[in-house]
Image (spheres, rainbow, N blue to C red):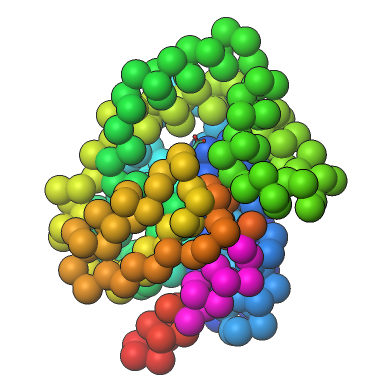
Amino acid sequence: MELNHVADGPDDAPVVVLSNSLGSDLRMWEPQVKPLVEHGFRVIRYDTRGHGGSPVPPGPYRVDDLGGDVLALLDGLGVASAHFAGLSLGGMTGLWLAANAPERVRGLVLCCTSARPGNRQMWLDRAAKVRADGMAEIADGSLGRWFTPAWVEAHPAEAVRLRDMTAATPAEGYASCCEVLADLDLVPESAGITAPTLVISGADDHALPPGHGELIARTIPGARFEVVAQAAHLGSYEQAETFTELIIGHLKTQEAVA
Ligand SMILES: O=C(O)CC1=CCC(=O)O1
């Protein structure tokens, strides 16, 4: 299975892989691409299975399926190791990769994510709902979790575009990724992560509040933790400049010490 992906930046530059959240696709990283390339990185964005233009195998999926897809993508592109930044579901994929394929992950950035999301029944109910009713209602709800009300009010056209991104996500892909979250517990294996790690939470993220990021940062040896103000769940989009600066700063430090 080949994931849909887009590469920007020079072939010989250090690679950063960007991984999307539940209900979005690789376009969620648009604000980060140009700055990362300008700072000397090759950016590979991909659509998680069941999302965007990637295949939609029948579910349920497990986090090792999502991580295995990234390893296959890197193998196919001839990339031995890369930096990895993921938001929410993408961050969970990053945790799995760094714990299970440490030689492939040079630096890790975990945005608005969790190692143990909890709320098992809520995820199973959400999966059942989208399989029964489709994505429209979920898309309205997502927008309310992704952004603060002030951002939505100030960016009506972008809000519609991002809502439509969720609405266009295949219901089976979305539901199968909800099932990844239902039973996920990456806390024990996170303790063994050796990749230099930056964890970023949004102060206004009510989907995965900063306590989730704090737990990850306490669990991964040496991890740094930042909380960004006026950022809800899609913090890297709402507070793009601040997230981008933090991501670039962390990854450039890793390149300098390599
Ligand atoms: O959509 C949500 O409720 C929040 C979320 C959890 C995992 C993810 O990627 O988004």
Asked if residue 143 lies left or right of residue 180, the reply is right
Work out whether 212 lies above or below 80: above
From the top left corner, tell me how far across and down residue 204 is, in percent.
50, 51
Residue 25 visible in the current orientation: no
Q: Which residues are magenta?
A: 239-249
- The quarter of the picture where residue 106 lies is bottom left
Query: Residue lying furthest top in this view?
Result: 132
Work out whether 1 lies above or below 75: above
Query: Residue lying furthest right in this view?
Result: 157
Q: In terms of secondary structure, what is the magenta stretch mainly?
A: helix
Instruction: Work out whether residue 5 or residue 221 is closer to the camera in this orientation and state it.
Output: 221
From the top left corner, tell me how far across and down residue 51 is, in percent.
59, 36
Instruction: Identify the image quadrant of the C terminus.
Output: bottom left
Query: Residue lying furthest front in this view?
Result: 150
From the top left corner, tell me how far across and down residue 47 is, in percent.
58, 45
> Count of labels shown?
0
At x 32%, y 24%, the residue is 120
Asked if residue 176 lies left or right of residue 56, the reply is left
Asked if residue 183 lies left or right of residue 248, the reply is left
Work out whether 84 lies above or below 176: below
Asked if residue 222 lies left or right of residue 212, the reply is left
At x 68%, y 64%, the residue is 31
**Magenta stretch: includes residue 257:** no
At x 65%, y 38%, the residue is 143
Work out whether 158 lies above or below 54: below
